[in-house]
Amino acid sequence: MLSLITGLFLFLGIHSISIIAEDFRNTMAAKSENGWKIIYSLISVVGIVLIAKGYAALRLEPVLVYVPPYWLKHLTYLLMLPAMVLFVAPYLPGKIKQVTQHPQLIAVKLWAFSHLLVNGMLADVIIF
């Protein structure tokens, strides 16, 4: 579990720098744009590897957080339909992007929420 949490911390932490510490990011990029991109990429890759390793380890010894009712499976299928449409919407002609502003973000939120509905294991709850 430690590797999963560490991986999430690294991955989300480095991606949050642009939101929380914009001055720090701009300073690093001004010093060396390529150097900053390399550091950013390496930390992201290490985070993803740790997430995958931790998730796999937690799946070997599953901890049940909740038992989802069977009917939520159907709701998940229903939520995934607009999620798929919203995910590709920025690349297709139409007004979905104009109306929703960030259709891929909404799609990822729908995807994660729908997966939380049907996956009650600890590893899944942490990831989603």
Image (cartoon, rainbow, N blue to C red):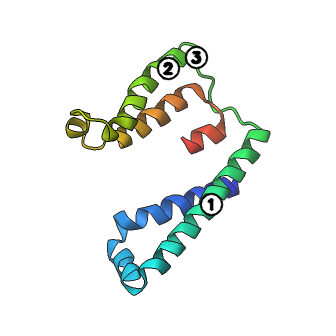
Report crowding for label 1: few under 14, some 14 to 19, many 20 or more residues within 10 A (C-alpha): some
Q: Which residue appears farthest toward the right when viewing the image? A: 60
- SS of the residue at dot 1? helix
Tag 1 residue: 6
Q: Residue at x 60, y 29 (%)?
A: 119
Name the image quarter holding residue 92. top left
Left or right relative to 107: residue 49: right
User: Between tags 2 and 1, which lies in front?
Assistant: 2
Q: Nearer the viewer, residue 69 or 85?
A: 85
Q: Amino acid at mark 2?
A: Tyr
Give residue 69's mark. 3
Q: Where is residue 103 shown, x and y percent of the image?
A: 32, 39
Give residue 77's mark. 2
- SS of the residue at dot 2? helix
Q: CA distance from mark 2 to mark 3?
A: 14 Å
Q: CA distance from mark 2 to mark 1?
A: 31 Å
Position of residue 74 relative to residue 15, above or below, is: above
Q: Where is residue 38 shown, x and y percent of the image?
A: 53, 74
Q: Where is residue 2 shown, x and y percent of the image?
A: 69, 57
Q: Residue at x 46, y 78 (%)?
A: 34
Q: Amino acid at mark 3?
A: Pro
Name the image quarter holding residue 123. top right
